[in-house]
Amino acid sequence: MTFPAKTIYNLEDIAGKKALVRVDFNVPLDEDKKVSDDTRLRAALPTIKYLLEQGAIPVLMSHLGRPGGEVDEDLRLAPVVEPLRELLGGIKVKAATDTVGDSAKQMVDSLETGEVGLLENLRFNPGEKACDSEFSRKLAAFGDFYVSDAFGTAHRAHASMTGVPEFLRPAVAGDLLTNEYKVLSEVRDNPDRPFVVLLGGAKVSDKLAVIERFLQHADKVLIGGAMAYTFGLARGEDVGDSLVEPDFVEEARRLLDNRDSYNGELVLPLDTVIVSSDDVNSETQTVPAGEIPDGWEGMDIGPETCKLFASELSESAMVFWNGPMGVFEMEQFASGTNHLAETLAEIDGKVVVGGGDSVSAVNKAGVQDKFYHISTGGGASLALVRGEELPGIAALDKRDKIIDNIDIG
Ligand code: ADP
Ligand code: MG
């Protein structure tokens, strides 16, 4: 698999130069504003460490949450500084309190070799999401070259992703971005077979194109989560008060009608765990999928479905998993998701997980180390496996030394 852009490893003579690095530090914070999961910080380390080893000075920039283009005290990047300093072995991390203002300028000017800089939350500035060229130009002025390592936002044409490289070259990919791309394009183009896809979660609308793509290319597509009820509705079944997307019933019906024309087999749940819509903490029942009474809601796949899905997954050589099987945030509806996470941890096949909630379900089950790849990007991983070009990669310097598909660069 050849990565289409230049990477940090293609750069020479970067000692003493400032590397403006777009990272993905969009981490969860707890009530005390402490980083509650540092996966994304750790994922950025190979690039930051490599730059430091080469004598370059990393100036890091990221967004955090959705401040909507203005300063939000709760979404400052300050909580990231101490964990980052520790992960980097105690080196100095200097943080600015604005994105392109006086604080940022002074901080960047003061940086010395062996130190790391961090700009304030990019989305405090409306220019970030709008990909404003003035904002991009100001950011670009902070570096001698640009590195993109934010796989989680690679599907977004924001200032820090596609605007900055219009003003700053070389523009290359970091280690994380390269690695994510390689694994996910292996899933997309060249999976080990049998290749089984496990899809769940809440929003069919986001994932229909993914389902269709995998029905064409995978051997099996297993569907759980709330998504299954939209398919149930399309089959004319009783879904009670379960979460469905009526606007997508027609599309789901089309996929079902064309079932036989696809390479991959579509596998839907056999049974479902339901609860009264009046009280999610009341006693649950298990009923056949498609026989959910009014006043009841499907919240998880049932034990028969677990068994069926587990046996399909056990025989696979590669698995792509996106979306939990039920409302896993609540203990009483987490068993389908946990059961399959544990099954996937045990199988010999390569398991690739993408999707914010799927990844947190895997972390919660404590089996993350047993997987082949855990993607740091939800929307970006889906866009990539759907076959879309990612703007954050397209904006980088192209590889120029690819001969007969042999990568010599
Ligand atoms: P990911 O972030 O992994 O891509 P999604 O965001 O699509 O996954 O979906 C995750 C959400 O889906 C979770 O919050 C979970 O509670 C919800 N969900 C899963 N199954 C159901 C269900 N049966 N009814 C309602 N919500 C569900
Ligand atoms: Mg999600």
Image: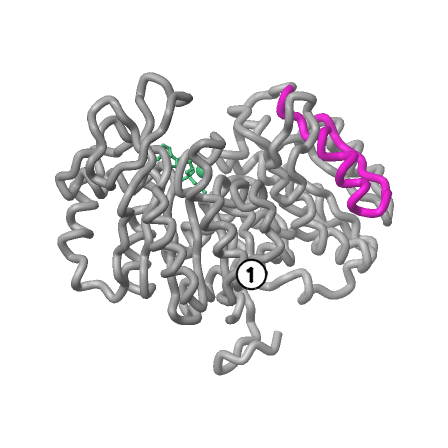
Q: Nearer the viewer, residue 58 or 259?
A: 259
Give residue 192's position: percent from left, percent from top.
44, 71
Element assignment for label 1: loop
Magenta span of residues:
74-97
Residue 263, compared with residue 209, is above or below; it is: below
Q: Nearer the viewer, residue 386 or 53?
A: 386
Give residue 87's position: percent from left, percent from top.
78, 45
Q: Look at the image and say whether residue 260 sits in the magenta stretch.
A: no
Residue 260: quadrant of the picture: bottom left
Q: Is residue 345 left or right of residue 289?
A: right
Residue 398 seen by the camera: yes
Q: Amino acid at mark 1?
A: Tyr
Residue 25, compared with residue 144, is above or below; it is: above
Q: Residue at x 31, y 58 (%)?
A: 213
- Quadrant of ligand 2: it is top left
Q: What is the residue that sits farthest to the top in this orientation?
A: 278
Q: Residue at x 82, y 58 (%)?
A: 53
Give residue 216's position: percent from left, percent from top.
27, 63
Q: Nearer the viewer, residue 146 or 376?
A: 376
Bin the neighbour count of mark 1 within 10 Å (Cα to Cα): few under 14, some 14-19, many 20 and up: some
Q: Residue at x 17, y 34 (%)?
A: 238
Residue 157 seen by the camera: no
Q: Residue at x 33, y 48 (%)?
A: 305
Give residue 355's position: percent from left, percent from top.
47, 45
Residue 314, compared with residue 407, is above or below; it is: above
Q: Which residue is mark 1?
A: 372
Q: Is residue 101 left or right of residue 292?
A: right
